[in-house]
Amino acid sequence: TLQVAMGFALLSSLYGDFMQAVGASARIFTLLDRKPDVFVPLNPLVLPHLTGEIEFKDVKFKYPSRPETEVLKGVSFRVERGQMVALVGPSGGGKSTIVNLIERFYDPNEGTIAMDGCDLKLLDLTWFRQKIAMVSQEPTLFACSIKDNIAYGREATDEEVIEAAKQANAHEFVSEFEMGYDTLVGERGVRLSGGQKQRIAIARALIMDPTLLLLDEATSALDAESEHLVQEAVDRAMMGRTVIVIAHRLSTVRNADKVVVIDKGQIAEMGTHNELLATHGVYKKLVLRQLAAGYTGDAKDQLPRHVKE
Ligand code: ATP
């Protein structure tokens, strides 16, 4: 089952392109036959003491399926080890693309992305993917047991699975199922709530003990209870790690060491929440429009009075 699941993971990484191919079955076959787009070095490198420091240098990128559109037009920024950097900006600006490039679903057309000073292209991809974990807004759970969903592409003991689930605030609800961690999820199994799925996804990320954590914060509000449990789990997962988060919550951007505002494929502004508010630019407008996505989290996240128009 796990192999099937991992096959799906690969497929889902191609999902964006897949959607472009739907309706033209001939193209679907082309897509499924497609080799990964990324560069494979002759002697892939493994870095022994990874810190998770990331640097984008003048990165330009077009999706292979849409060569006419430059999605990133020269993006440069740096994330120091242990920092939390928030990517914000209007929809379609390129935030997810930046994360896709870090995950190496694609390589930049120009410029470089380096971790600890080493171009990602030169790294051993399988090794590198074990050092990063992504928690997406709508995590994909596979039609297998909760245990396998958490352990995912890694050999893990039951104890490790349970410890990760505890950290992710998932242990309690999983234990309430008659079959516990052997409970099947998906069509033939239990239906989990959005917040429960997210906590499983956080446990999955934690079990990899990643150096770099990538997060796509949910735009849709969960119920207050779930919201709190998910946020607590996310906060725990961030501790001691380098984190890049596509942020939709005001509390996240306030806590970020650096906020990078991405607009139309370029960095519009960069700085801390307070610095950016003081510049009266794009960021302030975004904040006033509740970070564009309309979601700011719970009541304590209400806008401070001084930024109200
Ligand atoms: P949102 O906040 O809505 O998620 P975003 O800032 O994350 O937006 P991206 O998803 O990175 O923006 O999209 C940037 C541009 O790239 C958009 O024009 C989008 O249509 C395009 N794009 C995104 N994914 C693909 C893909 N797989 N193939 C082709 N074009 C894509």
Image (cartoon, grey):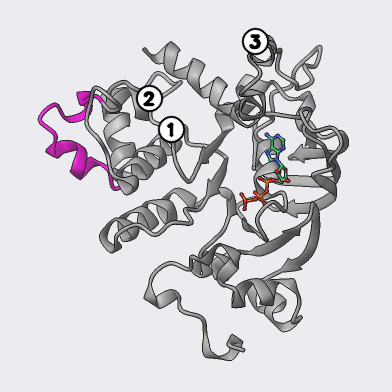
Amino acid bearing label 3: Phe
**Residue 180 on the magenta segment:** yes
**Viewer-proximal residue, 241 or 69?**
69
Residue 142 tag number: 2
Amino acid bearing label 2: Phe
Say if mark 1 contacts mark 2, CB within 8 Å: yes
Residue at 73 percent across and 29 percent down: it is: 106
Residue at 61 percent across and 74 percent down: it is: 287
Q: Quadrant of the N terminus?
A: top left
Q: Earlier in the sequence, mark 1 or mark 3?
A: 3
Q: Which residue is mark 3?
A: 29
Residue at 69 percent across and 72 percent down: it is: 283
Q: Is residue 39 above or below residue 99?
A: above
Q: Quadrant of the C terminus?
A: bottom right
150 horizontally vs 124: left or right: left
Q: Is residue 180 above or below residue 70?
A: above
Crowding near the residue tagged with mark 3, few <14, some 14–19, many ≥20 C-alpha atoms within 10 Å = few
Q: How many marks?
A: 3
Residue at 51 percent across and 65 percent down: it is: 249
**Residue 176 on the magenta segment:** yes
Crowding near the residue tagged with mark 1, few <14, some 14–19, many ≥20 C-alpha atoms within 10 Å = some
Q: Which residue is mark 1?
A: 140
Query: x and y percent of residue 284 in the render?
Result: 68, 77
Q: Earlier in the sequence, mark 3 or mark 2?
A: 3
- Specify start and end residues of the magenta stretch as a single range: 169-184
Query: x and y percent of residue 55 in the render?
Result: 77, 46
Mark whose residue sits in front, 3 or 2? 3
